């Protein structure tokens, strides 16, 4: 079986028709094209993968890859990040068993905002805050291959944020024959999912191929009340231009989520007491809540009274589950192409467009009907928000933080083969994103007074009739700003083979030029990022340029402003790979990366003594990563081991400054990390596959950091990074009993994780074991048809998944606040049946 797969991959690489469309699992068509020769070598020497999980790598950096053979064994609809969680170096904690609520990424200690997530070469991290939304990824059934570069990027990575590595996945290619499949899934927590894919086969005069796919998922939260709903559409059309690997492809993706949020418990304090007087003992909410590990948002809502002529106040119901819904609409169009201009000269162009409309879904406020925002330019009066005929009340309304992004990109390469062993590549990448961040107030629907909901999940953005307007006719907003983030990046790479092609050397450099244009349309509270968006007329401008407002005391505000910040750097990316013997190779790599400050922090501003505006001086983060590794590949073993060192400088930490009353980003020094990662796949018999990994990490903060404007220092020197396990181990065994039945079992051990910067509180280690079993009906004449059962968290382990990290968990100490955490999903059983045609 494995020799057959090896032959297929070797043939594919030689022909070229697939090798340039993801065979290398790289960032872009250009990167894939430069790695095709290594694919040929791998295919000729032995099996490319064992069980789709142990994939033989040849690049000069630490990379781990899985393909569809393994992806298909996991839970239907699962986020690809959870599937990659078995690979070394990556710690991913899912927010729910099926992946539609997102989760948290840690890669060698770097959080998801510092890890580049790409999809067919396009960057998916938010261009404003760099967040990676793992619940919005492509349906796993459509992913050909996914890989993790731990610590380093590719030389053409179009990112201004990745200091901790990259996670890449590529889409399946349409088949030459017409066909498809339909799939249905059922599981615990009322899980229902339906999906289908149709391949057109070759059509038209040029042998064009295409596929379309759609899925719908809906299930209940595993704790509390609420449900999650997800709809996704995908399509791809592919045109081979000739027999040398040239092609053009166009793909489309649309994803819509409507999810009720989960609420995590507060954890115990470091001392077990809640205040300095130590009069109240603090334990985790899971020990005090009547719902135990099922602690979540409030299950009931006290209906407000609505009486004309009397004061009616909405109770404090912001924690009610029905007012905690997280909506998102995301989509993209992706192009991939390769053109041979002449012998030895290849051009690749990958354009893209992305669309996002989303908010966190929890924004709401109780507004007095005579609030200054509602009066606007009027000195008296108000707005009857609840329709009871008076303006005496306090009424709950929605105050969202909507982000609408239009993002354009291109990743292009010009590849020149000087001869069979030497290649030059020049690349250009553009990533241009326009963020429109608004907060149109909208109404809460109280038609069922004990079960309120938002009239629209995006507030007043989409419907004039759902807008809260003041006496001036102005739609109230919680924010109103426009930001443009643009990255222009140039890179150059040389790749040469020496010593009878045993030694491959890569010499690369990339030069990112990054710019943020900031347009604040509201009034900003001085020395803060808090804003008021209002039609109120300010008082006369103060001598320093600030303004005040009648009724708002002496609080000073900075008028709407515009500013532009720029960041650039020169970043080397070099490596070498040496093959010796029949099965051995060693590699080494060195790379540098940059992460520019995020949009939100740059809107903080302060009026200086000379009247000018003082904006944040936070500098970009930088990292230097060194990898040394060894690989061993035979027909039955695929193994890799590496040691690494990473130095992370100018680390940015966002802390709450009590003097300023806001969160402030600061550069707080360096982090140094060293570690060891290893993986081995072994096929002792044709039916049995074994895979294991180990990840060891020692990551320390090198400096204390200034915590607030008063200069107080948080004692962090020598401390470990938060939410980062020092040990992780994983193991998977799969066995094919016969032509009909196969099964696999896998487990991941995640070590203890610190919750606070000063390391005064941590959570326990945990192990999650999953099971999969498949009944394949191919032997019965139904090729591609099967029934699969998955069990997630087989032994029902209780653990904390995501962590709400804090500076300190010790009452009375600098930076103290009560930490919180997410709850790991309990045992979950699901089944899927697929019918292929």
Image (cartoon, helix red, strand yellow):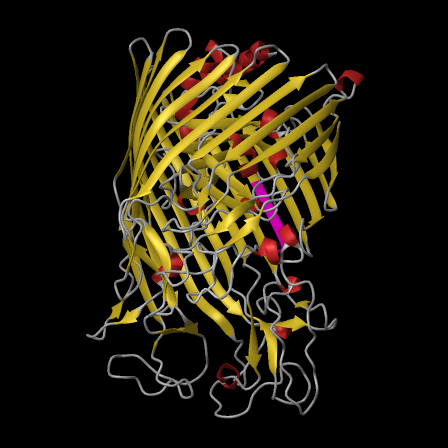
In screen coordinates, is 719 left or right of 370? left
Nearest to the observer: residue 658 or residue 837: 658
In the rendering, at what x and y percent does residue 798 appear? Answer: 60, 43
Question: Which stretch appears magenta?
Answer: 252-263
Q: Is residue 173 visible?
A: no
In the rendering, at what x and y percent does residue 779 appear? Answer: 77, 16
Q: Residue at (44%, 84%) from the top-left corner?
A: 536
Q: Residue furthest left?
A: 610
In screen coordinates, is 366 left or right of 300? left
Q: Is residue 212 visible?
A: yes
In the picture, the quarter occupied by the N terminus is top right
Q: Main secondary structure of the magenta part?
A: strand
In the rendered image, which quarter is residue 527 located in? Answer: bottom left
In the rendering, at what x and y percent does residue 734 appear? Answer: 62, 21
Specify whether residue 654 is painted magenta: no
Q: Residue at (35%, 36%) from the top-left corner?
A: 698
Query: Measured along the vertical axis of the image, is residue 80 above or below residue 222?
Result: above
In the picture, the quarter occupied by the C terminus is top right
Query: Measured along the vertical axis of the image, is residue 503 above or below residue 493?
Result: above
Q: Residue at (46%, 81%) from the top-left corner?
A: 535
Q: Residue furthest top?
A: 581
In the rendering, at what x and y percent does residue 690 appear? Answer: 56, 19
């Amino acid at each position: 079986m494995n020799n057959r797969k090896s032959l297929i991959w070797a043939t594919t690489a030689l022909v070229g028709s697939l090798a340039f469309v993801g065979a290398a699992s790289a960032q872009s068509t250009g990167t894939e094209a430069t790695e095709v020769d290594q694919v040929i070598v791998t295919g000729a020497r032995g099996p490319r993968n064992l069980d789709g999980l142990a994939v033989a790598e040849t690049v000069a950096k630490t990379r781990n890859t899985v393909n569809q053979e393994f992806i298909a064994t996991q839970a239907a609809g699962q986020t690809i990040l959870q599937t990659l969680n078995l690979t070394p170096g990556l710690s991913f904690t899912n927010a729910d068993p099926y992946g539609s609520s997102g989760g948290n990424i840690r890669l060698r200690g770097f959080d998801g905002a510092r890890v580049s997530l790409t999809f067919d070469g396009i960057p998916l991290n938010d261009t404003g805050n760099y967040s990676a939304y793992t619940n919005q990824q492509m349906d796993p059934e459509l992913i050909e291959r996914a890989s993790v570069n731990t610590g380093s990027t590719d030389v053409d990575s179009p990112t201004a944020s990745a200091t901790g590595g990259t996670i890449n996945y590529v889409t399946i290619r349409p088949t030459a024959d017409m066909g498809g499949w339909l799939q249905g899934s059922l599981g615990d927590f009322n899980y229902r999912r339906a999906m289908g894919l149709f391949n057109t086969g070759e059509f038209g005069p040029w042998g064009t191929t295409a596929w379309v796919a759609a899925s719908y998922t809906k299930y209940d939260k595993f704790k509390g009340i609420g449900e999650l709903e997800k709809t996704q559409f995908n399509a791809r059309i592919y045109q081979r231009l000739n027999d040398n690997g040239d092609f053009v492809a166009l793909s489309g993706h649309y994803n819509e989520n409507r999810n009720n949020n989960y609420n995590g418990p507060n954890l115990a304090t470091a001392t077990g007491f809640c205040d300095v007087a130590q009069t109240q003992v603090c334990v985790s909410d899971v020990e005090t809540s009547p719902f135990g590990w099922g602690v979540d948002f409030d299950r009931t809502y006290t209906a407000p009274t609505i009486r004309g002529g009397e004061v009616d106040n909405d109770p404090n119901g912001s924690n009610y589950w029905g007012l905690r819904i997280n909506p998102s609409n995301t989509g993209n169009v992706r192009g991939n192409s390769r053109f041979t201009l002449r012998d030895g000269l290849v051009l690749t162009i990958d354009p893209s467009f992305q669309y996002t409309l989303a908010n966190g879904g929890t924004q709401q406020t109780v507004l007095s009907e005579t609030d200054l925002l509602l009066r606007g330019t009027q000195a008296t009066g108000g707005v009857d928000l609840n329709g009871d005929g008076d303006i005496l009340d306090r009424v709950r309304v929605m105050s969202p933080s909507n982000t609408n992004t239009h993002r354009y990109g291109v990743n292009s390469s010009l590849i020149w083969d000087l001869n069979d062993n030497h290649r030059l590549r020049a690349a250009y990448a553009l990533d241009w994103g326009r963020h429109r961040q608004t907060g149109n107030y909208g109404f809460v629907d109280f038609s069922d007074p004990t079960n309120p909901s938002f009239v629209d999940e995006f507030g007043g953005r989409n419907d004039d009739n759902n807008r809260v307007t003041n006496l001036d006719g102005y739609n109230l907003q919680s924010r109103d700003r426009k930001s443009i983030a643009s990255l222009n990046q140039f890179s150059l790479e040389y790749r040469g083979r020496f010593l009878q092609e045993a030694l491959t050397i890569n010499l690369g450099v990339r030069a990112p030029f990054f710019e943020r244009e900031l347009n604040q349309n509201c009034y900003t509270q001085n020395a803060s990022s808090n804003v008021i968006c209002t039609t109120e007329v300010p008082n006369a401008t103060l001598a320093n340029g600030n303004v005040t407002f009648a009724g708002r005391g002496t609080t000073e505000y900075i008028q709407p402003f515009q500013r532009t910040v720029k960041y650039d750097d020169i970043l080397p990316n070099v490596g070498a790979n040496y093959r010796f013997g029949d099965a051995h190779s060693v590699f080494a790599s060195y790379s540098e990366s940059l992460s520019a400050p995020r949009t939100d922090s740059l809107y903080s501003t302060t009026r200086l003594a000379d009247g000018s505006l003082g904006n944040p001086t936070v500098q970009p983060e930088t990292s230097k990563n060194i990898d040394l590794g060894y690989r061993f590949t035979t027909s039955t073993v695929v193994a890799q081991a590496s040691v690494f060192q990473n130095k992370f400088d100018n680390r940015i930490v966002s802390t709450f400054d009590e003097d300023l009353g806001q969160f402030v980003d600061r550069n707080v020094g360096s982090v140094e990390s060293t570690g060891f990662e290893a993986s081995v796949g072994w096929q002792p018999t044709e039916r049995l596959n074994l895979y294991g990994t180990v990840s060891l990490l020692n990551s320390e903060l090198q400096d204390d950091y200034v915590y607030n404007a008063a200069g107080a220092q948080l004692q962090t020197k020598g401390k470990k990074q938060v939410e980062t396990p020092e040990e992780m181990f994983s193991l998977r065994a799969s066995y094919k009993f016969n032509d009909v039945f196969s099964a696999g079992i896998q487990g991941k051990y995640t070590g203890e994780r610190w919750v606070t910067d000063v390391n005064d509180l941590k959570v326990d280690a945990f192990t999650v074991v999953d099971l999969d079993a498949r009944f394949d009906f191919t032997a019965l004449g139904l090729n591609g048809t099967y029934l699969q059962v998955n069990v997630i968290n087989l032994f029902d382990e209780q653990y904390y998944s995501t962590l709400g990290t804090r500076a300190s968990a010790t009452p009375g100490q600098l930076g103290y606040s009560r930490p919180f955490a997410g709850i790991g999903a309990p045992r979950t059983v699901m089944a899927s049946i697929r019918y292929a045609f």
